[in-house]
Amino acid sequence: MYPSITPPRQVKIGDAAAFAGTTPRAIRHYHEIGLLPEPERGADGRRRYGYDDMIRLLWIRKMAAVGISLDDMRAAFDEARDIEEILSRLEETLAAREAETERQRAAVHRLQAVGNPLGLLSALVTDRLSHLPPGALRPSDLDALLVTERIFGLLGAAIQASVFIALATHPDLRAEDDRLDAAEAALDDGVDIHDPRVEELAVQRCAHQRTLEQAIEAAGLDMAEEKLFEMYDAGLKGEEDTQMSAFEAITKMPYDFSPARMRCMELTAQLLADAHSANH
């Protein structure tokens, strides 16, 4: 004779979880969110699960396997929403996820082609810099472009790229830029804003910026910038991040600049504005 196996009428939570392919913790969570009715407890105070409970658990596991959310499952079980509607929304979600995966795959391919970390910047920016030889750009250049992308968007960073192209291709301009950076860094908190060095450096920085602009024009980089504006105006905005305004972003980016250095920057901006107005 074959042995007779009599299945239990009810099982403990551990046995229920093992059969359904889940965990007791997950089952308890289903109870908490109302997805699985909590069964009565036995004389020992533990939950006991019957046939209907196990059927519900198995359906939950099947629906989870195809990506249906717990909230949508609950709605389906409560007959508050048709399962076909849930599946249609799931299909839309999967399509969006596939599109995002393709975007990420394209970004990885660009990283492999351009290199890291330059390839982490927007394509509009990296395309402008891709012709430069390895090592021509400094880490600080890429840092500045990263910040500009965040504050002024990819178009602003793509325009700023002209400056770094000019610096990378003109050693004399790069040397002067380094000298001015060091002089401005020396304007620490111990320097008064009315110190003559502040205005002197502003004049020098303005002159250097004007020389940079001339180098950019001589290389035809300004024409490339005009094409960028045309592309942008045509709607090719790419990966613009609009979570905050430029003003908000500027106020949230910390720079440990002394009052004297801030004053130098303000004077430089004013001198440049006056120079541009005089030329027009």
Image: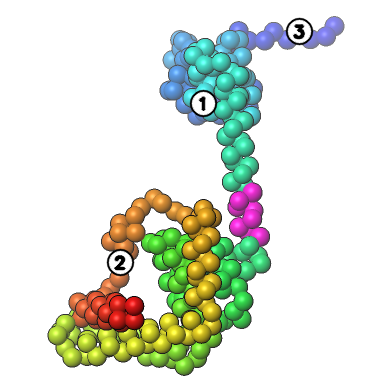
In the drawing, does residue 195 fall left or right of residue 160?
Answer: left
Q: Indicate the secondary structure of the residue bearing disc 3.
A: loop
Distance Cα–Cα, label 3 vs label 2: 76 Å
Mark 1: amino acid? Leu
* Cβ–Cβ under 8 Å for marks 3 and 2: no
Q: Is residue 234 visible?
A: yes
Could you say which disc has been placed on residue 242 in the image?
none
Q: Indicate the secondary structure of the residue bearing disc 2.
A: loop
Could you say which disc has been placed on residue 4 in the image?
3
Could you say which disc has been placed on residue 70 in the image?
1
Is residue 241 covered in magenta? no
In the rendered structure, which disc, 3 or 2, sits on the residue that comes first in sequence?
A: 3
Q: How crowded is the residue under tag 2: few (<14 C-alpha within 10 Å), some, or many (20+)?
A: few
* Cβ–Cβ under 8 Å for marks 2 and 1: no
The secondary structure that most of the magenta stretch takes on is helix
Q: Which residues make up the magenta segment?
A: 102-109
In the rendered structure, which disc, 1 or 3, sits on the residue that comes first in sequence?
A: 3
Image depth: mark 3 or mark 2 in front:
2
Image depth: mark 1 or mark 3 in front:
1
> What residue appears at the point 46 percent right and 78 percent down from the top-left corner?
163
